[in-house]
Amino acid sequence: MTVRPGFIETLACAQQRNNSLLCVGLDPQAEKIANYGVDLTGFLRAIVDATADQVCAYKPQFAHFAAMAAESALEEIIDYIHNQYPGIPVILDAKRGDIGSTAEKYAEEAFGRYAADAVTVNPYLGGDTLTPFLQYTDKGVVVLCKTSNPGSGELQNLVLDTGERLFERVARLAANQWNSHGNVLLVVGATWPQELARVRAIVGDMPLLIPGIGAQGGDLQQTLKHGLSANGDGLILSASRSILYAGDKGADFAEKARLACETINLAVQDMLA
């Protein structure tokens, strides 16, 4: 049996090899895919084949597959990425969070059934609910911290008795208590650059998954300014719809997706030059 390196190591190697901080979210929408004249599996494989040398990770979104009763396609595309592009890790975007034996089953689902290299999790039930995921020490556990949606501040920005905001407490716990195996990452939206700066100051070099640079309108330059670690890395820039559906219709959808990736990568490289 082939033993894959840990998620953090695989991610770093992919970023260096492809000179890319970009993660492509795989969020299938049946009504859009119908415009391209292919089935779901054909669409996903074409996107991966066209972009594999442009990315550091893929991030299939569980709900998009489940809503289409396409869990088998999710298994197939993760297996396809692992077999065809073994240096590219897969983050299962499932945002799991529950207690006890249920959390254990969610971890088994993500890392056993789907063989994901990392999974997104919700920490707001408490740190003990993350333990079943963290025990998979070769896998990444991507903890929601400051999410990209407009209403995230209703709870995540609440000020605690200590004077810190709730998302800051999550960042501090992630860095100081939950990361004993070195496999924790945080989700921080590109739509909140000042909060991103605060998280980076708290967690040091911990990798951050950054949604919101595409269709949600996050500012790429501000994200790099406030989110890069002291070593000039530490970011996974996630874009989904703006890449997957860069082409409106027609057989060139994969080429358009690749072009969208190249555009983001060149913009990042120019800003870092």
Image (tube, grey):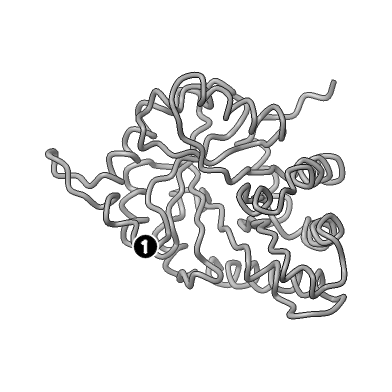
On screen, 45 above or below 256?
above
Direction from residue 180 to residue 266 in the image, left or right: right
Does residue 11 appear anywhere in the picture? yes
Foreground pick, 72 / 166: 72
Residue at 74% over, 48% down? 70
Does residue 24 appear anywhere in the picture? no
- Residue 111 picture quarter: top right
On screen, 213 above or below 168?
below
Quarter of the image for the C terminus: give it: bottom right
On screen, 202 above or below 140?
below
The residue indicated by pointer 1 is: 192
- Residue 148 picture quarter: bottom left
Residue at 70% over, 56% down? 55
Foreground pick, 81 / 207: 81
Direction from residue 239 to residue 147 in the image, left or right: left
**Percent x, y of residue 159:** 17, 48
**Percent x, y of residue 24:** 66, 58
Question: Which SS class for mark 1?
Answer: loop
Direction from residue 114 to residue 50 in the image, left or right: right
What amino acid is at disc 1?
Trp
Foreground pick, 19 / 185: 185
**Percent x, y of residue 258:** 76, 69
